[in-house]
Image (tube, rainbow, N blue to C red):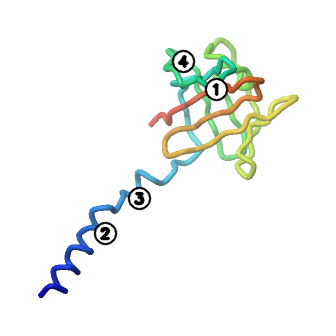
């Protein structure tokens, strides 16, 4: 009887810790992404993401092209001119003229890391 109760308790613990696979699986890179937050570190490592009000979008298409209603390679929240660049899913990079922007895709969040002296990143969410 004790063994049965112990077995049921262990099984209960295992199933209660199960995470939803949909929450963990990253979304597809292709599609439209909207800028929601930026991080501009002041140089002491204390920078945090701050919400922004911006209409800047990135649109990734399957032929390794990304377009935007803004300058893709500028660390800016403005959306006043369009641009196009190429990207590499193998390297997780967006290719600019003289440098690359590294990106990380975590679930429905896309984080771009720009080549700044101090840390600077932009966070996007997937538009349904």
Q: Earlier in the sequence, mark 1 or mark 2?
A: 2
Using the numbered discs, state the Cα–Cα distance from disc 2 to disc 4 in whole angstroms.
Answer: 44 Å
Camera-side residue: 37 or 60?
37
Residue linked to disc 3: 21
Mark 2, Cα crowd under 10 Å, few <14 / some 14-19 / many 20+, is: few
Circle 3 or circle 2, nearest the eye:
2
Residue 56 drawn at (x, y percent)? 58, 21
Identify residue for label 1.
Answer: 45
Q: Secondary structure at mark 1?
A: loop
Q: Give the Cα separation between the discs numbered 3 and 2.
A: 15 Å
User: Tag 4, which secondary structure?
Assistant: loop
| Vertical side of 90 occupied by 10: above or below | below
Q: Nearer the viewer, residue 2 or 32?
A: 2
Neighbourhood count class around disc 3 (C-alpha, 10 Å): few under 14, some 14–19, many 20 upward: few
Q: Going from the N terminus, do you reach mark 4 or mark 3 first?
A: 3
Mark 2 or 4: the one toward you: 2
Q: Nearer the viewer, mark 4 or mark 3?
A: 3
In the picture of the structure, the residue carrying the numbered disc 4 is 55
Residue 124 marker: none
CB contact under 8 Å: marks 2 and 4:
no
Q: Quadrant of residue 110?
A: top right
Marks 1/2: CA–CA distance: 39 Å
Secondary structure, mark 3, is helix
Name the residue carrying label 2.
14
Q: Nearer the viewer, mark 1 or mark 4?
A: 1
């Amino acid at each position: 009887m004790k063994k049965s109760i112990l077995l049921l308790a262990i099984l209960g613990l295992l199933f209660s810790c199960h995470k939803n696979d949909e929450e963990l699986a990253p979304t597809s890179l292709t599609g439209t992404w909207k800028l929601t937050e930026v991080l501009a570190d002041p140089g002491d490592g204390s920078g945090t993401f701050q919400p922004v009000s911006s209409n800047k979008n990135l649109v990734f298409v399957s032929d390794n092209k990304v377009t935007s209603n803004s300058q893709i390679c500028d660390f800016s929240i403005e959306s006043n001119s369009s641009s196009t660049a190429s990207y590499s899913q193998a390297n997780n990079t967006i290719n600019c003229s003289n440098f690359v922007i590294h990106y990380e895709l975590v679930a429905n969040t896309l984080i771009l890391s720009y080549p700044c002296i101090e840390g600077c990143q932009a966070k996007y969410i997937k538009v349904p």
